[in-house]
Amino acid sequence: MDDSSRRLQQRRNQPSFSSSSSTGPTRFRSQNFSTNPTKTTQSSNFVPRSNSTTATTPNNTRNTGHIRNRKSETYDGINQQQEEQEAREDVGSIIGTCPFMCPDGERAQRERLRDLAVFERLHGDPRKSSPSLAVKKFCRTISVKHVQASDVRPLAVLEDTLNYLLNLLDSSEHPFEVVHDFIFDRTRSIRQDLSMQHIVNDRAICMYEKMVRYSCPGTYAFYYLESNESVE
């Protein structure tokens, strides 16, 4: 075999790398591109980031409403405290000028309504009374803003009123229960006038002592009579 034939035979027996070298890098590049999960996942699941102000707008609006409500409640509470303070100051400056045991306006109204106790009726008439018989009633719903000095009795008149009421204990014309109810209500009115004028002195303390001395045994006797009647 000559040299030319040997060279030709060697070329045929050598492996061909042209096809593998040409397709290898191309195949490797295609695999890298197609099998990159990170890039493909990010590209498919990408969600644009929303603006922080738009995302929190509903919450901010809701919080703003709560803040406004709290501020309004705070302002209302402050206004109410100021009104109560002004009312206390107004009441503290009152000096009663009513010269009778019952103000004229209350006595006239109760005469129209026939709201007179048996001790306040003139000659037994439920529609007629007098300044020497009518005694101011206790009013639970009195408004401190609309208290007038002419409706409040001064200390001297309150002392005379209390003495008049305690003298009714010696009355035998009416049952003890009727007397007790009348004195109990009218002494509450006396304490109310003392409190509204902020009267705190020895004379007021003496009045409180008299009312306590009456209230304790009087209440005991009242309930004692009621218990005996229930047993009978």
Image (cartoon, grey):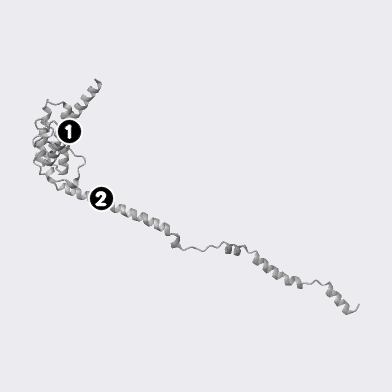
Determine contact: label 2, label 1, CB under 8 Å. no
Residue 40, given in percent of the width and then of the height, sits at 60, 64
Q: Secondary structure at mark 1?
A: helix
Q: Is residue 136 visible?
A: no
The vertical placement of 7 against 71, above or below, is below
Bin the neighbour count of mark 1 within 10 Å (Cα to Cα): few under 14, some 14-19, many 20 and up. some
Amino acid type for the residue under numbered disc 2 = Gln
Amino acid type for the residue under numbered disc 1 = Phe
Rendered-image quadrant of the N terminus: bottom right
- Quadrant housing residue 218: top left
Q: Earlier in the sequence, mark 2 or mark 1?
A: 2
Which of the numbered marks, if any, corresponds to residue 80? 2
- Residue drawn 37% across the image and 55% down it: 65
- Residue drawn 19% across the image and 47% down it: 145
The vertical placement of 201 against 39, above or below, is above
- Quadrant housing residue 30: bottom right
- Residue drawn 17% across the image and 34% down it: 185
Residue 191, given in percent of the width and then of the height, sits at 16, 38
Q: Secondary structure at mark 2?
A: helix
Residue 200, given in percent of the width and then of the height, sits at 14, 42
What is the distance, in whole Å, between disc 2 and disc 1 at their CAs? 33 Å
Which of the numbered marks, if any, corresponds to residue 184? 1
Rendered-image quadrant of the C terminus: top left
Q: Nearer the viewer, residue 205 or 145?
A: 145
